[in-house]
Image (cartoon, rainbow, N blue to C red):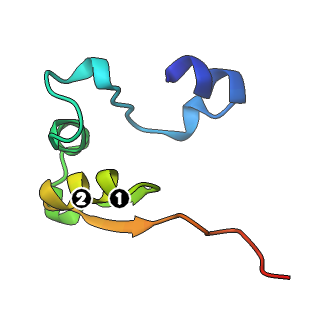
Amino acid sequence: MPSSLRHLGCLDWFDTIVCCEDVPRHKPAPNIFLEAARRLDIPPAECLVYEDTNPGIEVAQAAGMAVIDVRGMGSSSK
C-alpha cells in the first residue's frame, strides 16, 4: 500500500498508514481499524471510517467507529 501511495504522490497526506501485514487478524476482524486508532492515539468512538464495501462497513462498526459509505460519491446522474 505505501508503494502505491508513493507512486500516486500522496504518501505524505497521511499521519499513519496501517496495512493488513501490520495486524495479526485481517477483516472481518476489526484489528486493522483498531490498530489505526491506537497509532493515532484516538479512541475508536472518535474515528470516522470511509468505506466502500458492506464487509468493511460492518468491520468498522464492530470496531466502534462511525462510517461513511463512499459508494456512489462523486458520481453524477445525467
- Tag 1, which secondary structure? helix
Q: Which residue is at 16% across, 37% downward? A: 31
Residue placed furthest toward the bottom:
78
The residue that disc 2 covers is 58
Q: Position of residue 26 (x, y in %)?
A: 22, 30
Q: CA distance from mark 2 to mark 1?
A: 6 Å
Image-based side of 67 in relation to 64, left or right? right
Q: Residue 27, image x and y in percent? A: 24, 38
Quarter occupied by residue 45: bottom left
Q: Nearer the viewer, residue 46 or 73?
A: 73
* Residue under numbered circle 1: 54
Q: Give the mark count.
A: 2
Q: Give the side of residue 43 with respect to residue 47, left or right.
A: left
Residue 18's quadrant in the figure? top left
Residue at position x 30%, y 25% in the image: 20
Residue toward you, 13 or 49: 49
Disc marking residue 73: none
SS for dot 2: helix
Amino acid type at image mark 1: Asn
Q: Is residue 21 left or right of residue 2?
A: left
Is 33 situated above or below 18? below
Residue type (three-letter) at the residue carrying disc 2: Glu
Count neighbours of disc 2 (C-alpha within 10 A) and say few if under 14, some if 14 to 19, many if 20 or more. some
